[in-house]
Image (cartoon, rainbow, N blue to C red):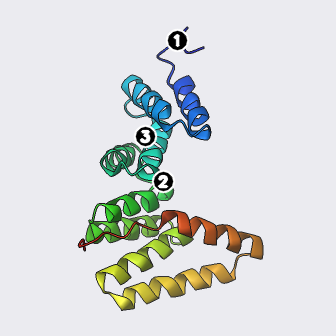
Amino acid sequence: VLARDPDDVEVLSKLCFFYCDKHDFSKATTLFEAALKVDPHHEMSLKNYGMVALQSGSFDVALRCFERYLDVNKWDGTIFGPYAATLANTGQLSVAVEVAERGLRLDPTQQKLHALAAQLYARLGDRKKSLQHRQILAEISKQLDPWDKKRMERKQKEIRPRPQSGAN
């Protein structure tokens, strides 16, 4: 299919998912880059390439993808968690907390983002704001059924920023 129409961004994007599922991130990266050459504003490619870059530790690539994604779609609250985690992983804790708060203004029910904000505030030494986010998270969690709670606990572990030695 790709040989017939190498500029079909939808096909390229779907192939990216295929290779991500196969854990062939090198091939997926090549395809994400090809898709973004065809359409530099393709939301799905920007978002998912950023996620793959974050997971593989390519924080500079992830930051560029998330920033470009937000230029295209500033209303998707789900992007702020990975974006803030990437910033935290590069040592930009103050900016990361601003990004997390921005996402929470869009959707204050995002549990992962409250958990991340609590962690970031704790790392910055602001125990009061960290506690506020933990309390909000607890209130939201009370409203979930047990299955959702277990799923959210697993998800929260996925977004934790990596500890940085010597970085604030």
Q: Contact, CB < 8 Å: mark 1 with mark 3? A: no
Q: Earlier in the sequence, mark 1 or mark 3?
A: 1
Can you identify the residue that label 2 sits on? 76
Q: Contact, CB < 8 Å: mark 2 with mark 1? A: no
Name the residue located 46 percent from the left edge and 34 percent from the top edge. Answer: 26
Can you identify the residue that label 1 sits on? 5
Q: Say which mark, if any, is on residue 46.
A: 3
Residue 163 shown left or right of residue 25 in the figure: left
| Residue type, numbered disc 2 | Asp
Mark 2 and mark 3: Cα distance apart in space: 13 Å
Q: Contact, CB < 8 Å: mark 2 with mark 3? A: no
Q: Is residue 110 visible?
A: no
Name the residue located 54 percent from the left edge and 68 percent from the top edge. Answer: 157
Residue 1 shown left or right of residue 102 in the figure: right
Name the residue located 31 percent from the left edge and 69 percent from the top edge. Answer: 164
Q: Nearer the viewer, residue 30 or 10?
A: 30
